[in-house]
Amino acid sequence: MNVVFTHHDPLRAQEVRDRLLERGILAAVVDRSNVWFGAARSYDVMLCYGVQYDEARAVLAQTDDSPGHAAKSGGSTDQDADHEDGGWQPDLTQLGSDKAPLCPACGVRLPLDAGLGSCPACRSAVDVVDLIVQRHGPEALDGCYPREESSVESAMIERMMLLCPTCRYSLDGMPRVGTCPECGEGFDKVAIVRDFLGG
C-alpha cells in the first residue's frame, strides 16, 4: 500500500496531503475507521503512484511528518499544539445548533465553541470539535475551515506525475488540457486531480 502518513485528525491528514500536492505528489486522504468495533477514527494519506513513495517520505521527513509519526507517537502532536493556541480551531458558528454536542458526563448541550475545554455545567473536560466529528463525521466541519484546496494551481499540476485516465499513458510534458497521443481520448489534468481527490 502507498500509505505515507496516518493520523486521528482528518484536518492534520489533509494538511499533509496538501503539502504533498504542493510538491507535485498526488495524494488523497482515506478514512480507515473501524466503526464496527468502535475504534477511534484514523485517516491515511495515500499516494496515487507508488513510484513517488520515497519522494513523499523525504518531503514529510523535512517537516517532521514521517510516516505514521503522529498516529503512533501517543504524545501531543503539532496539531494538538496548534489546536490549543487557536491556530487550527474551526469556526463552529458556521454550524447549525443541531450539531452542538452533548457533554458526555452530564448531558448538557455544549456551546459551539472550538476553544471550550470544559463543560460549563459540570466542569468535565470536553473537546467540542472531537465530539462533533464522532457524532456527525469529519464532513460536518467542511464549512468551518477555509477552502484552500478548491482550486488546483497550474504550477502544481505541472509538477504532478499524471496518467491518462483511459489508457494510463504518461501525460508528463503535456498541456493542462489536450488529447492523449496513445489512445486519442481527451484529458484535463485538473479534472484528473479532482477526480482522484474526490471532487
Image (cartoon, grey):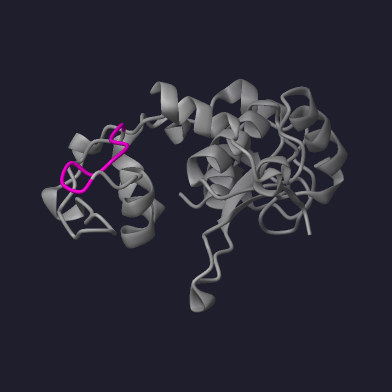
Quadrant including the N terminus: bottom right
Q: For the stretch drawn in magenta, what is the main secondary structure? A: loop
Q: Residue at x 54, y 38 (%)?
A: 12
In x, y percent, where is residue 71? 66, 48
Question: Of residues 101 and 162, which is closer to you in this image?
Answer: 101
In the orientation shown, which residue stands out farthest toward the bottom? 36
Q: Residue at x 66, y 55 (%)?
A: 165
- The answer to whether residue 30 is magenta is no
Magenta stretch: give its range: 115-122
Q: Is residue 157 above or below residue 4?
A: above
In the orientation shown, which residue stands out farthest toward the left? 97
- The answer to whether residue 116 is magenta is yes
In x, y percent, where is residue 153? 54, 25
Q: Residue at x 15, y 46 (%)?
A: 121
In x, y percent, where is residue 23? 70, 26
* Quarter where residue 62 is shown: top right
User: Horizontally, is 6 left or right of 11 in the view?
Assistant: right
Tell me how many marks there are: 0
Question: Of residues 124 and 193, which is closer to you in this image?
Answer: 124
* Quarter where residue 118 is shown: top left
In x, y percent, where is residue 157? 63, 30
Q: Is residue 147 visible?
A: yes
Question: Of residues 156 and 177, which is closer to you in this image?
Answer: 156
Q: Is residue 87 visible?
A: no
